Image (cartoon, grey):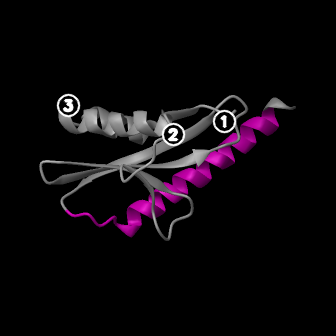
Amino acid sequence: MEKPIEVIFLKQAEEFTNSLDINPKKKLFQAMRKTKERLFGQWFTKLKSSDGIFEFRVDDSGKYYRLFAFWDTEEDEMTLVVATHGLIKKTNKTPLSEIQKAEQIKREYFEKKKRDKINESK
């Protein structure tokens, strides 16, 4: 049996989603709910030329809402989708700087996780 998927928010992702109006927020959480149910589509896609970065993407009133994320499959009980940060765009193109930011957050997340695990075993 496959492990359940859980979406967790890092601080910047939480601040971003909290700042959204109700309609795009609902759409974003609906995309997350589908992903947790292992339904995949245009609302959650891997970004080309990235190091394992995905994005939840919804549009509302001509704006594109993007929440960047990556997979953490190291947990025993569940698979995590870790949301890093988000942005609102009027175009459908993802800025390279935002992808790089998500990649940096991902590296820091796994480095911290590794340090914490080492400290636990001491």
- Residue type at mark 1: give it: Glu
Q: Residue furthest left?
A: 61
Q: Is residue 120 above or below residue 93?
A: above
**Residue 99 highlighted magenta (yes or no):** yes
Q: Can residue 46 be seen in the rendering of this structure?
A: yes
Along the line of sight, the residue nearer the viewer: 8 or 114:
8
Q: Earlier in the sequence, mark 1 or mark 2?
A: 1
Q: CA distance from mark 1 to mark 2?
A: 10 Å
Q: Which residues are magenta?
A: 91-119
Q: Position of residue 2 (x, y in %)?
A: 66, 35
Q: For mark 2, give the secondary structure.
A: loop
Q: Which mark is residue 2?
A: 1
Q: Residue furthest bottom?
A: 49
- Residue type at mark 3: give it: Ile
66 lies left or right of 35: left
101 lies left or right of 19: right
Q: Is residue 53 above or below residue 6?
A: below
Along the line of sight, the residue nearer the viewer: 57 or 85:
57
Q: How many marks can you see? A: 3
Considering the whole magenta stretch, tell me its main secondary structure.
helix
Q: Earlier in the sequence, mark 3 or mark 2?
A: 3
Are dots 1 and 2 in contact, CB under 8 Å?
Answer: yes
Q: Position of residue 6 (x, y in %)?
A: 54, 32
Residue behind mark 2 = 38
What's the residue at 47%, 68% (across, down)? Answer: 48
Residue behind mark 3 = 22
Are dots 3 and 2 in contact, CB under 8 Å?
Answer: no
Along the line of sight, the residue nearer the viewer: 10 or 50:
50
Q: Position of residue 119 (x, y in %)?
A: 79, 34
Q: Can residue 9 be seen in the rendering of this structure?
A: no
